[in-house]
Image (tube, coloured by chain):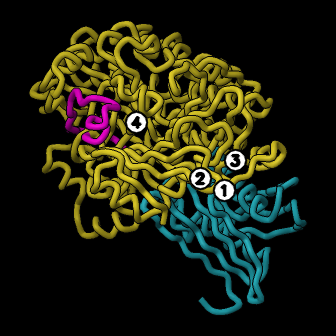
Amino acid sequence: MRAIERLDEHRYRIPRSGAMRVDGIVFASEKLMEELREDPTLEQVANVACLPGIVGWSLAMPDAHWGYGFPIGGVAAFDADDGVVSPGGVGYDINCGVRLLRSSLSLEEVRPRLKELVDALFREIPTGVGAHRREEVLSRQELRELVARGARWSVERGDGYASDLEVIEEGGCLPGADPDAVSDRALERGRSQVGTVGSGNHFVEVGVVAEVFDREAAAAFGLEPGSVTVLIHSGSRGFGYQVCDDTVKGFVKVSARYGIELPDRQLCCAPLRSPEAKQYLAAMACAANFAFANRQRMAHGVRKAFERVFGVGPSSHGLTTVYDVCHNIAKFEEHELAGRRARVCVHRKGATRAFPAGHPDVPVRYRGIGQPVLIPGDMGRYSYGLVGSAGAMERSFGSTCHGAGRFLSRAAAKRAARGRSLVRELERRGVAIRAAGMATVAEEMPEAYKDVAEVVDVVDGAGLSRKVARLEPVGVIKG
Amino acid sequence: MTSGESWYRILDHTADIAVLVRAPTLPGLYDAATRALFDVILDVRTVEPRDLSRVEIADAEDAEDLLVRYLSELLFLHDARDWLFRGARVEAMGAHSLIAHAAGERFDPARHRIERQVKAVTYHAVLLSEDRDGWSARFVVDL
């Protein structure tokens, strides 16, 4: 076991040793740290610290857990000249992320027709394994345009409004996307999956603003206490998995060619200035744009479902996008390191950007407040809206946590669910659910997850982001 | 499990799933690994071996890379073209290449209940080795 020093109430240090080039820093409470000590996450934080060109620290957010190569909840920045990019540091689900919509409807107005609404969402948005839109298979050329342009492509097809684009990270289009960098297989997998949720921990959730912590920020985000919200959690589907898969395969050789020693094959990487890295980043941007378009399409489906069930138009439901964040991504950003500005490639794998007020990348309408940060919890308890704060720029390359993290294995969750009707239990808690498969409901049951409130309290306490509002689910569709 | 037979075990970690496979021969290992991968996705007993899909892998780095590439190919056929497999017969095999025929059928909603989605077969902690009793492999899937 590695030596670990407690730095303060919310931070632990894994001191640099062996091949590590920088220290590891873990943001955690004492309780969360006790759980982390039991698994290989800390070793993975140390492994990432060995990669060439890493600057500052190898970081783990309080929701960190065991991943492949990089831990989930890991953040690492690499010097733009001497550093590397690692597809494993982004993950298979490139630009897995979260979009939050707010509405002007109250829970009292929605509650009587909630079941109908959940059914309508379930019909409108394909969920589950192998969810395809058979009626909506894009041509190869259409998909190439979509991945080059992201959410704007969807908006131009009639899925949503130009105003949505202003409140999506990167405006809904990561620059540098080149469809020629993407394999035919990725295009084949993606053609029928735009606008589908997928399975596992992905969902579309109708919620209510249950508690407000920061009135000014909540007002800026349009989150009125008692008003209905919709949270969408999904990513780049088979398209992104294939881009990652294609790259990881080649990068094992590429790492060897550039003389990079790997503590774990899944950490395979390429120097940022190499043609291989440029090709991956161009393909990764395509996958990120696929995910932006995917969430845009689903958000439009959410609006259509509300319009159908409540017989109202867009001006009455007032469903507007609060924000849309990526939590599996690598991006070039400028950060201050030891008193000087440096251009770095920040990898966030299961971590969310959290830029503070005044940062030029925060949308104009939130620039005085800070960037909204969206943290989904489990389907029975709550999710959080946060806002980026200055501490994130000093301590975590402008990053914060991304969710709750699993507590039980899938098998253990299924055992715990045996003999119980989870659908009825959730209904008693006021949550209506529709799922493609009951196995997913059992595996994703609330007890299978850590309490996201604990995670959020750490990032708030550590100054990485501030709590704005707590959202409680009332209706969920899952894969 | 009896000596001389193939078997696999699905190990469920907190966030993900690792699969252990053992078989007397290397082709037998590929057959069992095919079944194991699809047993993560659904009850593999519901898959009928109606058709064969030819899978060819070339230029693998080493034995582990060959296995991961092969399983990833099956996953692609599953996600993009709705295939489900329950076994495989290896036709030819070298140190860096393989030709196999995976046996299975297309997804039929009336008979198949998909339990979970496998995003990818990872290189994380992948192992493939031979001892005097046969072959074993371990791979981790991303869910």
Q: Secondary structure at mark 2?
A: helix
Which amino acid type corresponds to the residue marked 3 in the rendered image?
Answer: Cys
The secondary element bearing badge 3 is classed as loop
Pointer 2 residue:
A47
Q: Earlier in the sequence, mark 4 or mark 2?
A: 2
- Residue A397: give x, y in percent of width and height: 47, 30
Say which of marks 1 and 3 sits in front.
1
* Mark 1 vs 3, N-terminal side: 1
Residue A364 placed where, x, y %? 38, 7
Question: Does the residue at mark 1 contact the one at mark 2 (Cβ under 8 Å)?
Answer: yes
Q: Position of residue B97 (x, y in %)?
A: 87, 60
Going from the N terminus, do you reach mark 1 or mark 2 first?
A: 2
Q: Which residue, as the protein is rendered here, is positioned at the far left?
A: A108
Q: Amino acid at mark 2?
A: Asn
What's the magenta region? A457-479
Residue highlighted by disc 1? A263
For label 1, count other residues whose C-alpha is less than 10 Å away and answer few (under 14), some (14-19) or many (20+): some
Measured in 3D between alpha carbons, the distance from the residue under mark 3 to the one under mark 2, in whole angstroms, is 12 Å
Residue A121 is left or right of residue B121, and the answer is left
Q: CA distance from mark 4 to mark 1?
A: 32 Å
Is A148 situated left or right of A212 in this image? right
Chain identity for the colour yellow used in the image: A
Question: What SS does tag 1 mark?
Answer: loop
Reading the image, the residue beneath label 3 is A268
Residue bearing mark 4? A233
- Rounded to the nearest angstrom, the CA distance separating label 1 from label 3 is 9 Å
**At 74% across and 35% down in the image, what residue appears?**
A271
What residue lies at 58% left-to-right and 42% top-to-bottom? A89
